[in-house]
Image (cartoon, rainbow, N blue to C red):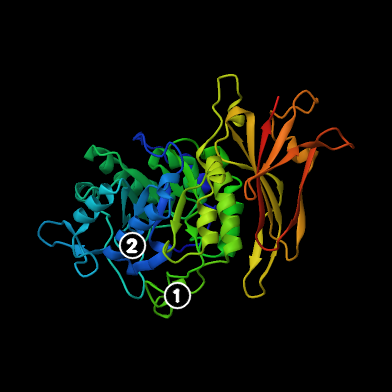
Amino acid sequence: MLISHSSSLLPLLLLLPLATSLNNGQGLSPQMGYASWNDCASEVTESRIRNATLNMISTGLYLKGYNHVNVDEGWLKGRDDLTGDLYENPKKFPSGMKALGDFIHSKGLKYGLYTSRGTCQCSTELYDAIGSQGFEEKDAAWLTEKGMDYLKEDSCCGGSNNPTDGFTDYGVMRDALNATGRPVFFSLCGWYSWYAPEGDNLGNSWRISGDGTNWGDLNSAININSGLSKYARPGAWNDPDLLVGTGIGSNSGPDACYDPTEISQTSEWYMTDLQSRAQFSMWCVMSSPLLISANLAQVSQFALETWGNEEAIYINQNFRKYGDEVDDEQKIYQGIRVSGEDLAYDKPTNSGSGNNVWAKPLPDRKWGMVFLNNENEVSDVVCDADCFAQLWDLDTSGGVKYQVRDLWTHEDEGDLLVAAADGGFAYTAKSLDPLGGVKMVIISPVN
């Protein structure tokens, strides 16, 4: 789960052909739902998952597309010495994993479980368990028998920085899942961007960076993802990690899962509500998985409004339909960075740098755009004529007008204006807050 990014092994990809591909019909749009890791770390319980299921419904998020409930690390007790079968921790999951899956399915949601491709799971000071290496076929059969619809497979204890091992191990589990005959969304948690060129052969999504548990980590994930747009498409998505809340109700406040002083790796977790909204905006334009990892019973109304913004979700879940006449390099399903530089954030000094503009092609010749301010003071963020030139099908001749709609105020702003100096379009997102100020718009042709 917690590993640094490296791209030094990317050339090795050319030496690693894969014999079998994944074609399971899953993930035709990025996955949405709840995942327990940043909410409970390894201290997840059956009660917490049942409540998360009910909260997904009571908050209205389920009706907006959030339909996965994923149990991350912490549910497993061990493996039977005689049969080799997995078994759950009976104190934390007294009804068993099958009964939990039945409960989630009875509410109309999908059921996710967790393992690791190595000999062990990633573990915390309060938990450790075995991985699936050497038992992939048996584990896949056991997990699907419990009703699993989604598998996150981590990368601990499996030669994490070696593409040869990673591709081989994930390929074994891919084939084991295919052999069960049950459609299972397969989420690879490998932490490196070099999974992206081979990702669609292995799984439905693949982690591209280390754990995104705070604003600095998420800055790094955005930077990495800016070079990976061409690998994303229906059924196959780059994954910069979970949607992170503020920690209220997770490791602090009412209904907290655990004491953060007992799990050292959680010490740098969580963000402000403002940064959480910036993350959500970026994840939508990047076609990233929208998996909320927070206690929905305790988060702020601001957070619920953020994750429940249907206009923003539209950008995440929809994409341009391309014909044969469109060049391959223009068949983009994930947003692209059209202006700005790599982002940076230093937590000890609470200082950042960099502004970004991202754009994603949408149906009906629309474009979704995000303007992000990561500087230390209130700033304007501009998309000038050179920036808009990368939105390749905008008509700058004056024959088509484009309307701008702000997706956070839910207001139409009027027409996109032509910059007098060069005849191209220009737009300024004005006075964005520092260190995570964001504006999200849709540009739509109106004639």
Residue at left 11%, top 56%? 83
From this viewpoint, which residue is outermost toward the right? Answer: 421
Query: What's the distance in space between the residues labelled 1 and 2, CA to CA?
Result: 20 Å
Q: What element does badge 1 sit on?
A: loop
Residue at left 58%, top 34%? 332
Callout 2: few (<14), some (14-19), or many (20+) C-alpha neighbours within 10 Å? many
Q: In the image, 78: left or right of 36?
A: left
Where residue 107 sits in the image (x, y, percent)? 29, 49
Q: In the image, 131: left or right of 228?
A: left
Amino acid, disc 2: Glu
From this viewpoint, which residue is outermost toward the top? Answer: 325
Against 91, residue 316 (above or below) is: above
Say which label, 1 or 2, has the lower sequence index: 2
User: Circle 1 is placed at which residue position?
Assistant: 252
User: Circle 2 is placed at which residue position?
Assistant: 73
Residue at left 59%, top 51%? 281
Amino acid, disc 1: Ser
Name the foreground residue: 321 vs 155: 321
Against 324, residue 250 (above or below) is: below
Where residue 165 sits in the image (x, y, percent)? 37, 51
Say which mark, if any, is on residue 290: none
Name the foreground residue: 389 vs 21: 389
Against 49, residue 258 (above or below) is: below
Where residue 68 sits in the image (x, y, percent)? 37, 49
- Quadrant of image for the N terminus: bottom left
